[in-house]
Amino acid sequence: MKEEALTSISDITHIEARLYLTRLHKKKYARRSVARKTSSLRSFFKFLIREEHLSVNPFTTVSLPKQEKRLPQFLYSEELEKLFAVSDLDTALGQRNQLLLEILYATGIRISECCQIQLQDIDFSLGTILVTGKGNKQRYVPFGSYAQEALEHYMENGRKELLAKGKQPNARTLFLNFRGDPLTPRGVRVVLNEMVKKTSSTLHISPHVLRHTFATHMLNEGADLRVVQELLGHSSLSSTQLYTHVTKDRLQQTYNQFHPRA
């Protein structure tokens, strides 16, 4: 407004709105950032109209930039094996870290969901965990034999040791930090970064990369898209369709199998 010599917000028209977006593009903002700013301003002017301060929304005719379609980052089996091999299973923190990795990869749950797991949410007989997701929606997710073995080891040894260091002797949270308090999402990120450093890898890994890896590996092995949607806790199938890409190995395997001159 200052650059265009506008003194009142009521002076803004669709022309100024487009000029604003042009400036954002010149400053090389990412499409996602431009879309977020545009959406925020559109909502703000909608609010002003509702409160009868304005009569026209200058951002109504401005279209959001088309989003870039990027393949989600995921790990190959070889990279996962390196991560699974770094934890010292003779220590309490090593047992916890191993379980953390196993659970995130075995279930594909979000980092926030992982940190909220309570002991009573785990059903060893069925091999499932009751997970509370976005909007307090609950779902059951299964975990495999590797995760169960790591879970039993941690529960019998490492967790008891960590719990003894805390001030809550009756705490029911599954994952604890070195002080015996509940592990936070930020703490999980630190743990994963340290594990990557031990593999001498240049990979950038986050809890969400393990979620991407879970979904990618499930679909590449032939899992039904609707089932993966349910396991991930997606309300929309379009969110799950992001993972319908295939790995280079699968592409090469399919090419060699079906191309006449492969």
Image: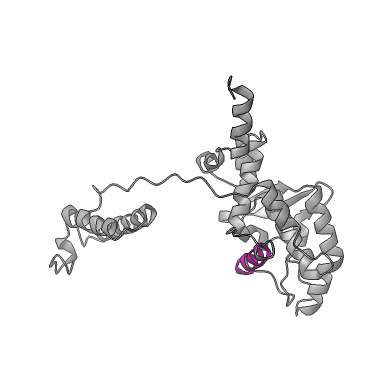
Question: In this image, 62 relative to 239: left or right?
Answer: left
Q: Position of residue 225 (x, y in %)?
A: 60, 36
Q: Position of residue 82 (x, y in %)?
A: 71, 55
Color theme of the render: one colour
Q: Is residue 250 above or below residue 45?
A: above
Q: Quadrant of the N terminus?
A: bottom left
Instruction: Name the residue located 36 percent from the left edge and 52 percent from the top edge.
Output: 31
Determine the main secondary structure of the stretch shown in magenta. Answer: helix
Q: Quadrant of the C terminus?
A: top right
Q: Is residue 193 magenta?
A: yes
Q: Front-most of 201 and 151?
A: 201
Question: In this image, 25 relative to 220: left or right?
Answer: left
Instruction: Name the residue located 80 percent from the left edge and 51 percent from the top edge.
Output: 146
Q: Is residue 127 above or below residue 198?
A: above
Question: In this image, 92 relative to 83: left or right?
Answer: right
Q: Outermost residue toward the left?
A: 5
Instruction: Name the residue located 33 percent from the left edge and 55 percent from the top edge.
Output: 34
Question: In this image, 61 relative to 70: left or right?
Answer: left
Q: Position of residue 158 (x, y in %)?
A: 82, 68
Q: Is residue 163 above or below residue 67?
A: below
Q: Position of residue 71 (x, y in %)?
A: 51, 45
Q: Outermost residue toward the right?
A: 156
Does residue 173 appear in this view? yes
Does residue 247 appear in this view? no
Q: Is residue 203 above or below residue 126?
A: below
Q: Front-most of 220 and 51?
A: 220
In the rendered image, which quarter is residue 195 located in? bottom right
Report the span colored magenta: 186-196
Q: Front-most of 49 and 241?
A: 241
